[in-house]
Image: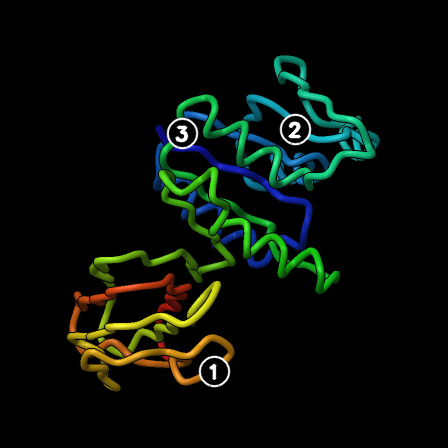
Amino acid sequence: MKALILANGELYKPDVLRGRIRAETFDLVLGADGGARYAYTLNVTLDAIIGDLDSLSDLEEQDIGNTEFVSHPSGKDETDLELALLYAKEQGANQIVMVGVMGGRMDMTIANILLITHASLSSCRIEVWHGEQTGWVIKPPGEDISGYPGDTVSLMPLSGDASGITTKGLKYSLKDEDLTFGSARGISNLLEEPSVHIKLSEGFLLAIHTPGRS
C-alpha cells in the first residue's frame, strides 16, 4: 500500500511534483495539518488530515467535504508529520512519499528528514520528494539505484558511521570502506551506468538522487 503525505513546509517545484504524483498510484493521501493546503496545487484528494488542526483556516476554500479529520492536542510530543507517518503505517502503508518536507525553519527541516529513520517505521520504504530530487534511507545489505549516467547521487551516514560500503557504477567508487558520521565525503557522486549498486554492511545511508549533474 502506497501513501502520499503533504507536509507543511515549502512546496518546491510544484509543477514537477504534480507530474511525479500523476505518474504514480497512491492508495492513501494525507495532509499533515497545514500541508493539506497543497492538495489543490498538486491536484490530489485528501483522505485524512492529521495533527492539531490549527491551520484549517487555510482550507476554507478547498473541497474537503469527504476528508477525515484525525485531531491531536496541541501539546503533543510528536510533530504533525510524525503523526501522519504513523497513521499511514497503521492504515497498512509500506511505501510512503512525503512532499513539502523542507522549509524556512531549520529545526523542522532536519527533524522531518530524520523521521525517515523512525524506529516504528522501519518496515516502511519512505521517500522525500523535493522537486525532481528523491531522498531515502539505504539499509544493509544495500540496494540498486536507477537513473541516467551523469545523475548526481549523495550518500550520507545517519545515526552513526556506516561501514562496509562498496559501490558499483559510481564515478567515485568505494570498496569495503566506511563513511564517518558528520563527514561530507559521500556528497556529489555521479552515476556512470543506468543502474548502480550500493552494498552496505552496517549503519544507515541517506541517499539523495538528483537527475542531471547538480
Q: For the residue carrying disc 2, how many other residues have a C-alpha within 10 Å: few (<14), some (14-19), or many (20+)?
A: many
In the image, what residue occupies the spot 36% across and 68% down? Answer: 211
Q: Do the residues labelled 2 and 1 touch (CB within 8 Å)?
A: no
In the image, what residue occupies the spot 24% across and 62% down? Answer: 145
Nearest the camera: 176 or 15?
Answer: 176
| Cα distance between the residues tagged 2 and 1 | 36 Å
| Residue type marked 1 | Ser
Q: For the residue carrying disc 3, how many other residues have a C-alpha within 10 Å: few (<14), some (14-19), or many (20+)?
A: many
| Residue 25 lies in quadrant | top left
Is the residue 24 above or below the residue 165 in the image? above
Is the residue 157 above or below the residue 174 in the image? above
| Residue 13 lies in quadrant | bottom right
Q: Which colour scheme is used?
A: rainbow
Indicate left or right for 67 with 144 as reference.
right
- Image coords of residue 199 (percent x, y): 20, 66
- Image coords of residue 110 (percent x, y): 62, 61
Residue that label 2 marks: 50
Q: Is mark 1 on a helix, strand or loop?
A: loop
| Residue type marked 3 | Ala
Residue that label 3 marks: 93
Badge count: 3
Q: For the residue carrying disc 1, how many other residues have a C-alpha within 10 Å: few (<14), some (14-19), or many (20+)?
A: few
User: Which disc, if any, is residue 165?
Assistant: none
Q: In which quarter of the image is the C terminus?
A: bottom left
Nearest the camera: 135 or 38?
Answer: 135
| Residue type marked 2 | Ile
Is the residue 195 above or below the residue 31 in the image? below
Residue that label 1 marks: 183
Q: Quadrant of the N terminus?
A: top left
Q: Nearer the viewer, mark 3 or mark 1?
A: 1
Indicate left or right for 31 with 22 as reference.
right
